Image: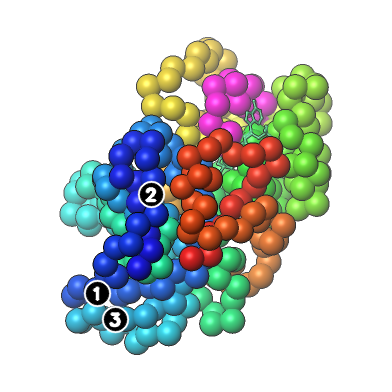
């Protein structure tokens, strides 16, 4: 079968490899759609640890083709979405119910072969059944949505709240929709590209600001009577961390979601955080949220089609992952 493998940092190659067989407790999924994520680009550049060689692709959806010994939950033919994160279940974090902080966390498409391939072998407990008639491209969105749901849970948005979202990539545009579903009244998306601000307004944002054209902190304070109830940082750059904590109202919450480069220090004013009792709440991965993401995607309530800006085959994956995102790019989908 064909698989796009990270052979070394900076080198991804489409190869012919042996089709995997289902081991005990495993299923084989024939990949129908897989999303390219910013993390894949970080892994390509060696900025995020992976196994090497490994087939990348941790956001995917496909059909169960084979069920291994001891698997009773699938017979074959089911459309499934896959939670890529495999917690050990026995480390102190897992035993405290925090699988996303597992000391031995493994991930499909990161530390074992993933979805930029025709087939993937995975533990059956990682797969969640979707309606058979669902568009598999929508199914490929379940993984990022599951991460966003964890952030929305942490944000504790209440009906009528004001929410600021910093960064209008696919994550920011999903957060806009989830904040709306959570009952937010005012949703302000802050991002530099006009096409993304326009998309945000179509998807439920009440305002969309360009941080290069306006004093975004002053604008948010003005629009929200002194500061937003919740700010969700989805850009992963120092500037949005620094400005974001200043957009929160006194006693409000700042949800840290964007991934800044490891070891990068960002100066903030601890006095201001203390004086204003700004709660910093990091949200990492998808603990216990994948089934809710699958249900939400299956319900059709989220607008996903307009987030797909390009669809490619396996032969183009290496060049897309190996290049910076193009202007206007939101989500690239791979159809093996
Ligand atoms: P993305 O496509 O890179 O989107 C982030 C966007 O933020 C950029 O494209 C950029 O859009 C905008 N941005 C950059 N600098 C900005 C600034 N100074 N002010 C306002 N906006 C700015 O990434 P994504 O796929 O949407 O993911 C967003 C972040 O979430 C990434 O850091 C990703 O690694 C992270 N993530 C975290 C988790 C988790 O579990 N915590 C899970 C998945 C992803 P413009 O050009 O329009 O400004």
Q: What are the residue bounds of the magenta stretch? A: 234-249
Residue 152 drawn above or below residue 290: above
Q: Are marks 1 and 2 in contact (CB under 8 Å)?
A: no
Distance between the alpha carbons at the discs numbered 1 and 3:
6 Å
Q: Earlier in the sequence, mark 1 or mark 2?
A: 2
For disc 2, the neighbor class at 10 Å (few under 14, some 14 to 19, many from 20) is some
Q: Is residue 318 left or right of residue 223?
A: left
In this orientation, which residue lies closer to the viewer: 182 or 43? 43
For disc 3, the neighbor class at 10 Å (few under 14, some 14 to 19, many from 20) is many
Q: Which quadrant contains ligand 1?
A: top right
Residue of label 2: 13
Name the residue at the bottom extreme.
75
Percent from the top left, x then y, of residue 96? 27, 50
Percent from the top left, x then y, of residue 10? 38, 36
Q: Do the residues labelled 1 and 3 touch (CB within 8 Å)?
A: yes
Q: Dot 3 lies on which element?
A: strand
The answer to whether one can see residue 146 in this image is: no
In this orientation, which residue lies closer to the viewer: 324 or 285? 324
Residue of label 3: 67
């Amino acid at each position: 079968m064909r698989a796009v493998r990270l052979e070394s940092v900076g080198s991804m190659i489409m190869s012919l490899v042996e089709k995997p067989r289902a081991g005990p407790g495993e299923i084989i999924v024939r990949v129908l759609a897989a999303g390219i994520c910013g993390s894949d680009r970080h892994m390509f550049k060696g900025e995020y640890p992976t196994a090497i060689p490994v087939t990348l692709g941790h956001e995917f959806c496909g059909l169960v083709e084979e069920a291994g010994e001891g698997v009773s939950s699938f017979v074959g033919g089911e459309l499934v979405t896959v939670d890529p994160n495999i917690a050990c279940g026995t480390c102190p974090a897992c035993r405290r119910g925090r699988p996303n902080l597992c000391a031995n966390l493994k991930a499909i498409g990161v530390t074992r072969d993933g979805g930029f391939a025709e087939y993937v072998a995975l533990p059956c407990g990682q797969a969640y059944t979707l309606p058979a008639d669902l568009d598999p491209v929508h199914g490929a969105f379940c993984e990022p949505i599951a991460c966003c749901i964890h952030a929305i849970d942490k944000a504790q948005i209440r009906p009528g709240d004001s929410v600021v979202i910093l960064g209008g990539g696919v994550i920011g545009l999903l957060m806009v929709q989830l904040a709306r579903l959570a009952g937010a009244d005012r949703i302000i998306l802050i991002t530099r590209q006009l096409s993304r601000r326009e998309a945000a307004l179509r998807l439920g944002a009440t305002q969309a600001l360009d941080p290069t054209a306006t004093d975004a902190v002053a604008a948010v304070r003005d629009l929200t009577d002194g500061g937003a109830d919740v700010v969700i940082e989805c850009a992963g750059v120092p500037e949005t961390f620094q400005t974001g904590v200043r957009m929160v109202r006194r006693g409000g919450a700042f949800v840290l979601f964007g991934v800044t480069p490891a070891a990068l220090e960002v100066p903030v004013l601890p006095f201001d955080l203390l004086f204003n009792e700004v709660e910093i709440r990091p949200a990492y991965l998808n603990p216990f949220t994948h089934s809710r993401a699958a249900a939400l995607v299956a319900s059709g309530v989220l607008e996903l089609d307009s987030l797909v800006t390009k669809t490619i085959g396996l032969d183009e994956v290496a060049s897309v992952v190996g290049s910076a995102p193009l202007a206007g790019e939101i989500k690239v989908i791979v159809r093996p």
